[in-house]
Image (spheres, grey):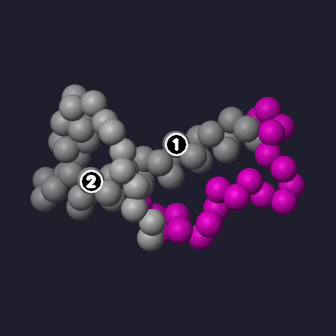
Amino acid sequence: MPKISVEMPGELLADLDEHVGDDGKFVNRSDAIRASVRKTLDVLDEIDARHGRLNDAGDGADDGASGGDE
């Protein structure tokens, strides 16, 4: 799996951390960020579909790695 580096404001990171750990929904920050990106891409795909911007061959968003982080 490729690794990326992301700059993030401290308040956004603090908010993310409230959802990570033993008492949170996510095991770690990476898990939380992957789930958030997947959900955001799904929403963007729905918007593109409503506006007729998705091609019939697929948009490339479904790489089979969606996994179920919801």
Between 27 and 5, the residue placed more toward the observer is 5
- Whether residue 50 sits left or right of residue 31 in the image: it is right
Disc 1 target residue: 40
Residue that extends furthest to the left in the rendered view of this protein: 22
Q: Which residues are magenta?
A: 50-70
In the displayed structure image, the side of residue 51 where residue 37 appears, left or right: left
* Disc 2 residue type (three-letter): Arg
Which residue lies under the disc numbered 2? 29
Q: Position of residue 64 (x, y in %)?
A: 59, 70
| Residue at image point 21% right, 32% down | 10
Q: Is residue 52 one of those drawn in magenta? A: yes
Residue 12, magenta (yes or no): no
Query: Picture quarter containing residue 52?
Result: top right
Q: Residue at x 18, y 42 (%)?
A: 18
Does dot 1 land on a helix, a strand or a loop? helix
Side of 52 where 43 appears, left or right: left
Residue 29 x/y as whole percent: 27, 53
Residue 11 visible in the picture: yes
